[in-house]
Image: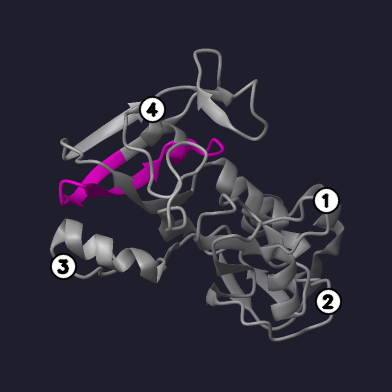
């Protein structure tokens, strides 16, 4: 099986069985009839949905014909919340001049890379990549207090807080939630943790850290208010490309206001891992 692309779409060549299997893997039933045979190859068009284009300063970290990774700043929603609020998905669409679809979320107050699908033709394959956990995220959490353990896992179910809207808590009747933590350093007052999600519950890292007595700095929901924004940033996104099958890794810087705390806790400047 051979794959090639140009500005119009993806071309497949190989045996009839290989082409049929790859086409079924990549396309939803809605777009199966879009496949066209051209000179011994099967052509799968991108069919981008265009929209007005404007350079709005959105930072593109990675882009090919199928996917884009974009840096989300703190304070910005990923999707429209129904209240005509500014959101990253609209900004990326405007930046690229095509309608895009976010494949996962980051909390509003968390910054970092977000993965987008660019073509509705290949949306099903991109969604399946996420569902099959072929995408992984790594976070830095700046927490209150001295963390003692070098590495540990918090495996506590999370459910909604019945008394506060849009707030979550550890709950025996909640959904399974598992987070892995690695201590990068501490200065006794604060600590820096590398966090990896086994599951993807809303506010998962924040709830888990608060539950063990180390709330994230600046977390007004699960910790304490202060002069700094939420000390949680996604810094790495890796995924197995749904079309080409190769692993893509994208790294991202974090909020400058936390660089001093990182240096104090680890004794060195931050370097992308």
Q: How many C-alpha atoms fall within 10 Å of the one at disc 2: few (<14), some, or many (≥20)?
A: few
Mark whose residue sits in front, 4 or 2:
4
Q: Position of residue 75 (x, y in %)?
A: 59, 60
Residue topped by disc 4: 211
| Residue sitting nearer the eye, 190 or 241 | 190
Disc 1 is placed on an element classified as loop
Q: Are marks 1 and 4 in contact (CB under 8 Å)?
A: no
The residue tagged 1 is 82
Highlighted range, magenta = 181-206
Which residue is under mark 3?
268
> Residue, x 17% and y 50% (percent of image)?
186
Mark 3 or 2: the one toward you: 3
Residue 144 found in image quarter: top left
Labels 1 & 3 near each other (Cβ < 8 A)? no
Report how far apart the C-alphas of labels 3 and 4 lie in the structure. 29 Å
Give left or right: position of 225 versus 270. right
Q: Say whether disc 3 or disc 2 marks the residue closer to the N-terminus.
A: 2
Rendered view: 28 above or below 116? above
| Residue count near mark 3 (Cα–Cα under 10 Å), binned few <14, some 14–19, many ≥20 | few
Q: Secondary structure at mark 3?
A: loop
Where does label 2 land, which residue?
50
């Amino acid at each position: 099986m051979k794959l090639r692309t140009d500005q119009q779409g993806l071309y497949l060549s190989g045996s009839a069985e290989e082409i049929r299997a790859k086409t079924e893997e990549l396309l939803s039933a809605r777009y199966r009839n879009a496949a066209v045979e051209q000179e011994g190859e099967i052509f799968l068009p991108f069919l981008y949905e265009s929209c007005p284009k404007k350079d709005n300063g959105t930072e593109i970290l990675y882009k090919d014909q199928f996917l884009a990774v974009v840096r989300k700043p703190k304070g910005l929603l990923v999707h429209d919340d129904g209240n005509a609020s500014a959101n990253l998905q609209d900004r990326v669409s405007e930046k690229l001049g095509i309608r895009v679809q976010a494949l996962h979320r980051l909390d509003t107050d968390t910054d970092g890379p977000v993965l987008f699908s660019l073509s509705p033709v290949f949306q099903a394959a991109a969604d399946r990549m996420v569902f099959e956990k072929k995408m992984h995220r790594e976070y830095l959490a700046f927490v209150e207090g001295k963390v003692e353990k070098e590495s540990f896992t918090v495996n506590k179910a999370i459910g909604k807080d019945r008394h506060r809207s849009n707030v979550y808590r550890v709950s025996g009747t909640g959904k399974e939630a598992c987070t892995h933590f690695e201590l990068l350093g501490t200065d006794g007052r604060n600590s820096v943790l590398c966090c990896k999600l086994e599951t993807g519950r809303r506010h998962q890292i924040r709830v888990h850290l608060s539950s063990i007595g180390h709330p994230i700095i600046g977390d007004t929901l699960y910790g304490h208010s202060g002069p700094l924004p939420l000390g949680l940033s996604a810094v790495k996104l890796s995924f197995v490309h749904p079309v080409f099958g190769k692993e893509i890794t994208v790294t991202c810087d974090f909020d400058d206001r936390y660089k001093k705390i990182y240096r104090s806790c680890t004794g060195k400047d931050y370097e992308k891992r």
